C-alpha cells in the first residue's frame, strides 16, 4: 500500500447534459497521508466526517497545471522560507477556490516526495481538519496516484459531454509529451516551470549543457537553480566541470571496503550522513574527539583541499563537483576561502563514496536526500559532535569557544554553531 492515496466516489447519478464541470465532478474525496486520513474534519456543529464532498475538478486541475514542479522541484536551500509562488505549486491549499481543503504539501526530495499534512482550522468554512501526518513515498508512487486521479476526473467530464476545459487542456499537455521530450520537461519541473514556460534562451542553454555535462549533472544543476539565477549558476557549474580535468586523483580505496549506510526513506536524510561519517572515522582509526580528524581523512584519501577554481562571490548554491572513476575520484572546489573549501571537500568525500563507479555529481544547496546527507556528513566530519560536547560547559558553548573551535578545526563558525544547535548544545554570547 502506498504512503499517499487519493480515493473518490462520484455522486450516484450522472449529471444531466449541460451541467457545469463542478457539478459533473462532485465527489466524496479522501486523501490519505501515511496511515492517517488528512480529509477528516469537524464541522461547525461538532459533527465529524471522514471525507470531503466537493468538486474534484479544482484539485485535478491544480495537479495537472503543476505536474512537473510537483514531481521534480525541491527546495533550493535549507535557509529562508518558501516564497508565495513555490507554495502555490506545492500546497494543496492553492486548489481551494472556495472549497475548504486540508493543508497538504508535496515537496520533491530527489527520488522521494515529502508529503506532509497539517491540522488546521479553515476559518471561513467553520471546519477543523484534525490530522497531521508525514510520509516519504517514492516519486513514482505519487506520480501514479496523481495520474490515476486526474485521468478519472477527465474521463468523468467526457462522460458528461464536457470538453475543452482548462483541466483537460492542461492534462493533454502532460500525457502528450513524447518520450524524447520527457527529460526536458523534468529539467523544467526541477526549475519550477512548466515546459512551455521555459524561456527560449534557457532552453538553448539546457540543450548545450546537456551535451556537455550529461543528464545527471544537468539535473543536479536544475534542482538547485531558480529560473532567474540559472545563467549565473550554470556558469559556476561549467567552471566546476572544467576543473575536474585538471584536478589530481583522490584515492577512494580506504572507503570501498566499507559499505556506505543505505538510504532509508523512513528516517531523515541527515542521519545517513552522520552515520557514514562515524563509520568512516572508526574504519580509519580516527577518534571522534580528534581536532585533526578531517585533515587525517583528507590525507589518507589524497584529497587536495589547497586547490580551487574561480569563485562567484555571490554564488553559494553550487560549490564543487566530483567525478568518480572506480577507486579514484577527481574533485573540483570553487571557493577561495579555506574553511568553505574544507567543508565542500568533506561533502565531496561522501558524494564520491556513494556515487556509481563512473558517475559525476555537483555539490549544491538543494534540499534533496543525497545533498542533505552530504552536508550532514561534512558537518560531522569537520566538526564532530563529540568534540563540541567535550569542549562545552553544561551543554553550552560561548561565542568565543565557537570562534576558537572554528580556528582550530579550520571550518566556518556557521558550521560549528549549526552542528552544536542541531545536537542540543546551546550557543551563548561571550
Image (cartoon, grey):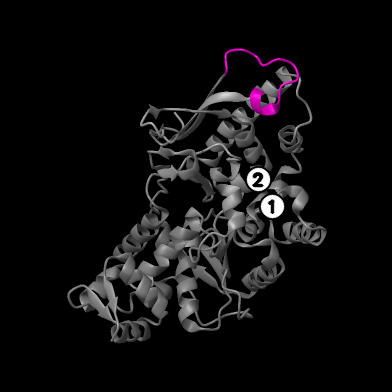
Residue sitting at the far left: 394
Residue 414 on image: x %, y %:
41, 76
347 left or right of 62?
A: left
Assign a secondary structure to mark 2. Answer: helix
The stretch drawn in magenta includes residue 15: yes
The answer to whether the residue labelled 1 contacts the one labelled 2, judged by CB atoms less than 8 Å apart, is: yes
Q: Nearer the viewer, residue 301 or 275?
A: 275
Q: Which residue is mark 2?
A: 68
Q: Nearer the viewer, residue 238 or 15?
A: 15
**Between disc 1 and disc 2, whose residue precedes?**
2
Q: Which residue is mark 1?
A: 193
Residue 369 on image: x %, y %:
48, 54
**What secondary structure prevails in the magenta region?**
loop
Q: Residue at x 41, y 39 (%)?
A: 128
Residue 240 on image: x %, y %:
63, 71
Q: Residues within 10 Å of mark 2 (few under 14, many from 20)?
A: many
Q: Which residues are magenta?
A: 11-23
Question: Number of callouts in the render?
Answer: 2
Q: Quadrant of residue 61?
A: top right
62 left or right of 47?
A: right
Q: Nearer the viewer, residue 86 or 269?
A: 86
Q: Is residue 116 visible?
A: no
Give the CA distance from mark 1 to mark 2: 7 Å
Amino acid at each position: 500500500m502506498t504512503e499517499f492515496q487519493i480515493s473518490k466516489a462520484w455522486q450516484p447519478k450522472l449529471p444531466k447534459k449541460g451541467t457545469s464541470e463542478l457539478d459533473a465532478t462532485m465527489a466524496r474525496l479522501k486523501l490519505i497521508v501515511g496511515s492517517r486520513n488528512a480529509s477528516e474534519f469537524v464541522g461547525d456543529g461538532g459533527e465529524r466526517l471522514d471525507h470531503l464532498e466537493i468538486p474534484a475538478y479544482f484539485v485535478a486541475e491544480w495537479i495537472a497545471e503543476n505536474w512537473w514542479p510537483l514531481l521534480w522541484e525541491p527546495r533550493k536551500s535549507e535557509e529562508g522560507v518558501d516564497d508565495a509562488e513555490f507554495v502555490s505549486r506545492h500546497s494543496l491549499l492553492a486548489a481551494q477556490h472556495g472549497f475548504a481543503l486540508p493543508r497538504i504539501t508535496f515537496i520533491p526530495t530527489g527520488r522521494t516526495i515529502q508529503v506532509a499534512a497539517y491540522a488546521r482550522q479553515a476559518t471561513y468554512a467553520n471546519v477543523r481538519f484534525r490530522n497531521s501526518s508525514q510520509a516519504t513515498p517514492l516519486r513514482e508512487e505519487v506520480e501514479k496516484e496523481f495520474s490515476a486521479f486526474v485521468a478519472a476526473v477527465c474521463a468523468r467530464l467526457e462522460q458528461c459531454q464536457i470538453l475543452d476545459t482548462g483541466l483537460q487542456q492542461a492534462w493533454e499537455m502532460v500525457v502528450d509529451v513524447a518520450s524524447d521530450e520527457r527529460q526536458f520537461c523534468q529539467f523544467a519541473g526541477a526549475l519550477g516551470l512548466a515546459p512551455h514556460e521555459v524561456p527560449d534562451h534557457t532552453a538553448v542553454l539546457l540543450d548545450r549543457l546537456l551535451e556537455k555535462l550529461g543528464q545527471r549533472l544537468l539535473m543536479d544543476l536544475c534542482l538547485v537553480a531558480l529560473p532567474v539565477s540559472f545563467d549565473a549558476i550554470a556558469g559556476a557549474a561549467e567552471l566546476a566541470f572544467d576543473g575536474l580535468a585538471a584536478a589530481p586523483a583522490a584515492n577512494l580505496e580506504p572507503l570501498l571496503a566499507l559499505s556506505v549506510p543505505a538510504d532509508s526513506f523512513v528516517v531523515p536524510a541527515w542521519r545517513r550522513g552522520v552515520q557514514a561519517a562515524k563509520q568512516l572515522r572508526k574504519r580509519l582509526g580516527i577518534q571522534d574527539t580528534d581536532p585533526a580528524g578531517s585533515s587525517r581523512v583528507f590525507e589518507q584519501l589524497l584529497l587536495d583541499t589547497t586547490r580551487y577554481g574561480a569563485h562567484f562571490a555571490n554564488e553559494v548554491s553550487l560549490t564543487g563537483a566530483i567525478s568518480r572513476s572506480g577507486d579514484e575520484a577527481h574533485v573540483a572546489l570553487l571557493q577561495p576561502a579555506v574553511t568553505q573549501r574544507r567543508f565542500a571537500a568533506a561533502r565531496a568525500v561522501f558524494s564520491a563514496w556513494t556515487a556509481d563507479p563512473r558517475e559525476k555529481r555537483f555539490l549544491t544547496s538543494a534540499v534533496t536526500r543525497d545533498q542533505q546527507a552530504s552536508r550532514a556528513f561534512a558537518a560531522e566530519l569537520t566538526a564532530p559532535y563529540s568534540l563540541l560536547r567535550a569542549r562545552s560547559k553544561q551543554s553550552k558553548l560561548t561565542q568565543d569557544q565557537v570562534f576558537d573551535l572554528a580556528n582550530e578545526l579550520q571550518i566556518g563558525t556557521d558550521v560549528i554553531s549549526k552542528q552544536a544547535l542541531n545536537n542540543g548544545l546551546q550557543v551563548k554570547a561571550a
